[in-house]
């Protein structure tokens, strides 16, 4: 499908490119093809910056607007959105594609023993940061806009090994509904994509991930796992004017797996 021009004249922030396999990378690919102007952040540190730049270079972005940001730091969040305002004045969209939980607790049979600090950090980075970005982005969207976040079916059903991340993603999906409710009067939409399992850095930290991939391929109606491009194109739809009547929703891109009982 030719989407060129669909996002012409629109600009926004993409948070979450860790390497060329990140969901955020595939979303950026779709946005760029549609003519969007994208700005980016990376986790602090030379190694993370290099990974992000390499992924962007593969997409043809040679000199990106790129800032370090620890989403768990209010000062870093303030700095990024202040720079966006100074450089561009307004934005049209935000992509929140970040999550974190200590991988030593993402193993089968270890949920109940999750320490308070691990639980709290997962909730902070995976869920709270979405509303933290929303409250900073809203003043930069005077004519409305769109936000998306990335979730997974483990937010709705218990998935062995997903553990505290599933609880955090459930909080993220609830956060999205409240963000959509509050920002709707400003014509700012907020939606979540619940993507099927994909071999990203964060996904590979989940114990038994290979087993999950195999089960989806066996049981999903389409009898396959999804591709990053399919999530990217769904994100493009939700960030574009094609979805201007959709907000507060969780859209499943999982080859239909979430519709199957057994």
Image (spheres, rainbow, N blue to C red):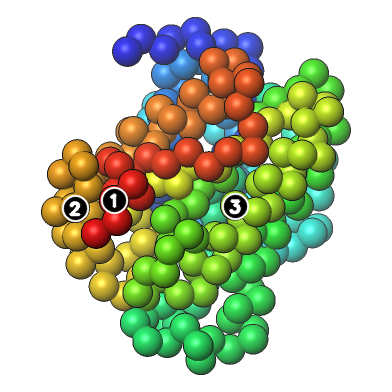
Q: From what the image shows, is residue 188 above or below residue 128?
A: above
Q: From what the image shows, is residue 226 above or below residue 35?
A: below
Q: Residues within 10 Å of mark 1 (few under 14, many from 20)?
A: few
Q: Residue 57 placed where, x, y %?
A: 40, 35
Q: Earlier in the sequence, mark 1 or mark 2?
A: 2
Rendered residue at 48%/59% (across/down) = 156
Q: Say if mark 1 contacts mark 2, CB within 8 Å.
A: yes
Q: Is residue 2 left or right of residue 142?
A: left
**Gap in angstroms between the C-alphas marked 3 and 1:** 21 Å
Q: Is residue 116 left or right of residue 47?
A: right
Say which of 55 and 232 sits in front. 232
Of all residues, the one furthest to the front in this rendering is 261
The quarter holding residue 172 reads bottom right
The quarter holding residue 140 reads top right
Q: Is residue 17 visible?
A: no
Residue indicated by mark 2:
219
Say which of 174 and 52 sits in front. 174
**Gap in angstroms between the C-alphas marked 1 and 2:** 8 Å
Q: Can you tell which of label 2 and label 3 is closer to the viewer?
A: 2
Residue indicated by mark 3:
173
Rendered residue at 68%/45% (across/down) = 177
Rendered residue at 33%/33% (across/down) = 229
Rendered residue at 51%/74% (across/down) = 164
Residue indicated by mark 1:
260
């Amino acid at each position: 499908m030719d989407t060129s021009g669909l996002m012409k004249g629109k600009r926004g922030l993409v948070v979450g490119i860790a390497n060329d396999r990140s969901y955020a990378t595939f979303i950026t690919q779709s946005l760029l093809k549609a003519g969007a102007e994208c700005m980016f952040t990376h986790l602090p540190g030379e190694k993370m910056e290099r990974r992000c730049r390499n992924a962007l270079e593969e997409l043809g972005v040679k000199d990106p607007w790129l800032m370090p940001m620890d989403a768990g730091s209010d000062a870093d969040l303030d700095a990024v959105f202040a720079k966006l305002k100074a450089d561009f004045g307004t934005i049209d969209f935000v992509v929140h594609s970040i999550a974190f939980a200590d991988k030593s607790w993402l193993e089968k049979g270890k949920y109940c023993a999750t320490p308070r600090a691990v639980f709290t950090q997962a909730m902070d980075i995976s869920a709270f940061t979405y509303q933290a970005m929303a409250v900073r982005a809203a003043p930069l969207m005077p004519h409305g806009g769109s936000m998306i976040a990335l979730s997974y079916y483990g937010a709705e059903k218990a998935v062995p090994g997903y553990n505290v991340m599933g609880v955090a993603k459930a909080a993220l999906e609830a956060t999205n509904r409240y963000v959509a409710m509050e920002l709707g009067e400003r014509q700012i939409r907020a939606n979540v994509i619940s993507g099927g399992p994909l071999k990203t850095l964060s996904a590979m930290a989940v114990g038994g991930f290979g087993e999950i991939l195999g089960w989806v391929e066996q049981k999903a109606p389409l009898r396959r796992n999804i591709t990053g491009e399919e999530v990217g194109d769904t994100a493009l739809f939700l960030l574009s004017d094609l979805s201007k009547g959709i907000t507060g929703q969780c859209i499943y891109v999982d080859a239909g797996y979430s519709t199957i009982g057994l």
